[in-house]
């Protein structure tokens, strides 16, 4: 659990989109005053923030420090993430994105559950690590803010049509299955000239040479990649092959687990891919239930007590007097989607109508009628009609294709958005050794 929490603190501190101000103990009283290491539009990043972020990375890689690049490269990587985070927060504020205390409370509840803790225990663990819980809340707020910015950008720029899904599934290049990938990205700046493109290509060549020379791929990603996940060793996790750009997918399908690709040119730069593992898709069989219901809702004309009594009366008419369920549903049910068809709910996955109905159906045998029970909608009477195993392979394949196309478009859209955000911002790295090599060259040019 402590390891999980430590990773969480690291992730909140560094990983996009949550790599703003970090969780660290208060500075000693005799520590020198902060200096400004970077100006980001109207905001600044302090040396203490950078130091804390670097320390978080070092703690995360404790025992594996050989994977970390030299200190100046690590500082540049971390500072780049801090700058990008600051720009996103600024943009979100410009768009009026607001995160309430209730939103943060809910996020804390989720983090606590993931770590199998209560919120109080989570707070104690954070403070035991030497961090400020107030800073922890601020980081969660920043994370939620950037997630909402991402959602706004994607919602406004990404859509998936049925025709796109049909074209993907019918394409001779369509590939099923999943792959676990890691990558190194060497970006090409927007509007780059031939010299800048050549410099990026040369850096990709250096990364490949280091890997061929025995450097661990994750360590090479930390050292050379400028993708947001570089400090995670470039790990992309499991991806469906149809989520990956076709040019890259063609390369991956010819690789074996453990192999590393050549430097591939993409829209935003050069990419080096490692196939960590792969697995095939299988048929998707889903349990479905068939049921019907009568719903009695309280209203201005029917008090809650009267609604309950009416449900009890209908239940006895069905069970004791053997009146027809469908007829009573047509006459009495207030569920607009099922009343006119005798309460028939059709075939559906167990959770499709909510947990309360799923729990009741799980206790019934076929053709058995439930006693009246209450949900947020009112009082229900259910009759379970059957159960079956349904082959949902085609529908799930279409759903996954829609998600894959959307994911691919979303990643490209947000990557373009971040590139534009960075290129149009005023960012001044005040400490020369923290500038990237090309930035130092530009600064020294007459």
Image (cartoon, rainbow, N blue to C red):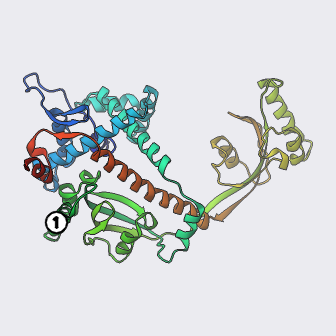
Taking the image as shown, residue 257 lies to the left or right of residue 220, namely: right
Residue under the image location 21 percent in, 41 percent down: 56
Residue under the image location 65 percent in, 54 percent down: 349
Residue under the image location 80 percent in, 29 percent down: 307
Tell me where residue 235 sits by quadrant: bottom left
Tell me where residue 360 sits by quadrant: top right
Q: Secondary structure at mark 1?
A: helix
Tell which of 225 and 41 is nearer to you.
Answer: 41
Return the residue found at the far top. Answer: 29
Taking the image as shown, residue 154 lies to the left or right of residue 217, namely: right
Quarter that holds the N terminus: top left
Tell which of 143 and 362 is nearer to you.
Answer: 143
What residue would you read off at disc 1?
Answer: 202
Q: Classify 13 as above or below 217.
A: above
Q: Classify 384 as above or below 404.
A: above
- Residue 157 appears at what percent x and percent y? 47, 50
- Residue 321 appears at what percent x and percent y? 92, 42
Q: Is residue 117 visible?
A: no
Q: Is residue 269 visible?
A: yes
- Residue 271 appears at what percent x and percent y? 28, 64
Tell me where residue 14 sits by quadrant: top left
Q: Classify 286 as above or below 134.
A: below
Tell which of 328 and 72 is nearer to you.
Answer: 72
Tell which of 93 and 112 is nearer to you.
Answer: 93
Classed neighbour count for the residue bearing mark 1: other residues with Cα under 10 Å, few (<14), some (14–19), many (≥20) = some
* Picture mark count: 1
- Residue 228 appears at what percent x and percent y? 29, 51
């Amino acid at each position: 659990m402590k390891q999980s929490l430590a990773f969480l603190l690291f992730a909140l501190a560094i990983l996009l989109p949550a790599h703003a101000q970090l969780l660290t103990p208060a500075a000693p009283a005799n520590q020198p005053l902060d200096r400004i290491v970077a100006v980001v539009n109207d905001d600044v990043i302090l040396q203490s923030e950078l130091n804390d972020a670097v320390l978080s990375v070092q703690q995360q890689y404790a025992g594996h420090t050989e994977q970390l690049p030299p200190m100046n490269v690590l500082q540049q990587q971390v500072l780049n993430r801090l700058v990008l985070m600051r720009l996103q927060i600024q943009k979100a504020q410009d768009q009026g994105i607001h995160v309430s205390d209730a939103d943060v409370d809910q996020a804390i509840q989720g983090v606590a559950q993931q770590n199998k803790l209560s919120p109080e225990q989570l707070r104690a663990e954070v403070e035991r690590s030497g961090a400020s819980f107030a800073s922890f809340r601020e980081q969660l707020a920043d994370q939620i803010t950037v997630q909402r910015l991402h959602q706004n950008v994607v919602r406004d720029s990404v859509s998936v049509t049925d025709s796109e899904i049909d074209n993907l599934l019918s394409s001779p290049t369509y590939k099923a299955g999943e792959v676990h990938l890691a990558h190194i990205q060497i970006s090409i700046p927007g509007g780059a000239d031939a010299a800048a493109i050549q410099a990026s290509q040369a850096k990709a060549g250096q990364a490949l040479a280091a890997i061929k020379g025995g450097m661990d791929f994750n360590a090479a990603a930390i050292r050379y990649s400028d993708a947001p996940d570089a400090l995670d060793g470039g790990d992309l996790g499991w991806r469906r092959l149809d989520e990956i750009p076709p040019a890259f997918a063609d390369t991956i399908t010819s690789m074996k687990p453990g192999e590393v690709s050549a430097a591939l040119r993409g829209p935003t730069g050069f990419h080096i891919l490692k196939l960590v593992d792969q697995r095939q898709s299988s048929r998707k069989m889903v349990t479905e239930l068939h049921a019907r219901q009568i719903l009695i809702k309280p209203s201005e004309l029917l008090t809650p007590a009267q609604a309950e009594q009416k449900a009890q009366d209908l239940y006895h008419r069905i069970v004791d007097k053997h009146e027809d369920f469908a007829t009573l549903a047509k006459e009495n049910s207030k569920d607009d989607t099922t009343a006119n068809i005798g309460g028939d709910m059709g075939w559906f996955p167990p959770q499709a109508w909510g947990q309360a109905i799923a729990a009741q159906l799980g206790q019934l045998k076929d053709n058995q009628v439930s006693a009246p029970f209450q949900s947020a909608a009112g009082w229900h009477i259910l009759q379970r009609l059957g159960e079956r195993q349904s082959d949902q392979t085609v529908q799930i394949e279409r759903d996954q294709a829609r998600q894959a196309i959307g994911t691919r478009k979303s990643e490209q859209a947000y990557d373009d958005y971040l590139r534009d955000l960075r290129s149009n911002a005023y960012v001044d790295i005040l400490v020369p050794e923290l500038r990237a090599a090309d930035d130092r060259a530009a600064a020294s040019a007459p």
